[in-house]
Amino acid sequence: MDLSKKKSIAQVCSEILADGLEIDLLINNAGFNPKDRKDDPNYFQSTFKIEHFDASNVAESLWINALAPMTLISRILPNLTDDAVALNISSWLGSIGGKTSGGHYGYAGSKALLNMFTRAVALEFSDTNKSAVALNPGWMRTDMGGSNAERTPTEVAQAVFALWRGGKLSAANGKFLNTDGSIHPW
Ligand SMILES: NC(=O)c1ccc[n+]([C@@H]2O[C@H](COP(=O)([O-])OP(=O)(O)OC[C@H]3O[C@@H](n4cnc5c(N)ncnc54)[C@H](OP(=O)(O)O)[C@@H]3O)[C@@H](O)[C@H]2O)c1
């Protein structure tokens, strides 16, 4: 689905609903970093520097990285099993306390919003066995992370599944985790 389009999300969710799929682990992994929009040379700066700030462009990151994942959780709620985990792939750049450099309104702002939304839905889940967890995957060798990054996405995926199989995601409702299961500061 195209997460930037409400209709596309709605269509996939209605198919999931119609199929009656039972989902025990929802990983909201897709993410958008405005630095990767190469078609417009001014785009990245318009989400990064206050003197070029463009609210519509910043909102695009907020939508894809935070509002779309939460829309997905909301729409497939009936398909989530009683002890399902909704795992939102966040970033250390979404940590408010850990922010040490200026700007980056689109990407860092979107991940900070995703962290808050994860915490918010986790507290809604607190009287159920469902969990919502934000996860910092670390620096990965992908298109976004580049070839100098520390870990392969496979290594990260294996670590995440180990956390899930070990029950550590279920036990981490409302937390911001690293892939070794330690807590990342908000
Ligand atoms: N790489 C890192 O070092 C790093 C660090 C911290 C956090 N993260 C987070 O980890 C997650 C995975 O990132 P990555 O490194 O794999 O990034 P990536 O190499 O840029 O890949 C992004 C993925 O998200 C999908 N995507 C982007 N916009 C979308 C949209 N509008 N609708 C549907 N799918 C969309 C892309 O699909 P297409 O290929 O079809 O465009 C692609 O599969 C992201 O949430 C990212 O923010 C990554």
Image (cartoon, rainbow, N blue to C red):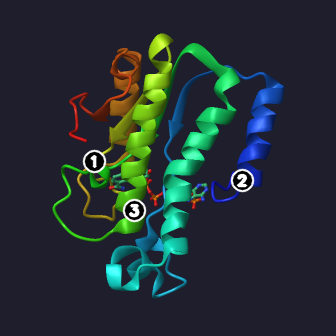
Say what secondary structure mark 2 lies in. helix
Ligand 1 within 8 Å, label 2 CB = no
Q: Which residue is mark 3?
A: 107
Tell me the amino acid under the disc marked 3: Tyr
Ligand 1 within 8 Å, label 3 CB = yes
Residue 89 spot, x, y in % from top left: 42, 43
Camera-side residue of 166 and 120: 120
Q: Quadrant of residue 50?
A: bottom left
Say what secondary structure mark 1 lies in. loop
Ligand 1 within 8 Å, label 1 CB = yes
**Above or below, 155 relative to 24:** below
What numbered label is drawn on residue 6? 2
Q: CA distance from mark 3 to mark 2?
A: 20 Å
Q: Which residue is mark 1?
A: 138
Residue contact at pointers 3 and 2, CB within 8 angstroms: no
Tell me the amino acid under the disc marked 1: Gly
Between circles 3 and 1, the one closer to the viewer is 3
**Above or below, 177 relative to 29:** above
Residue 153 spot, x, y in % from top left: 38, 47
Residue 130 spot, x, y in % from top left: 50, 17
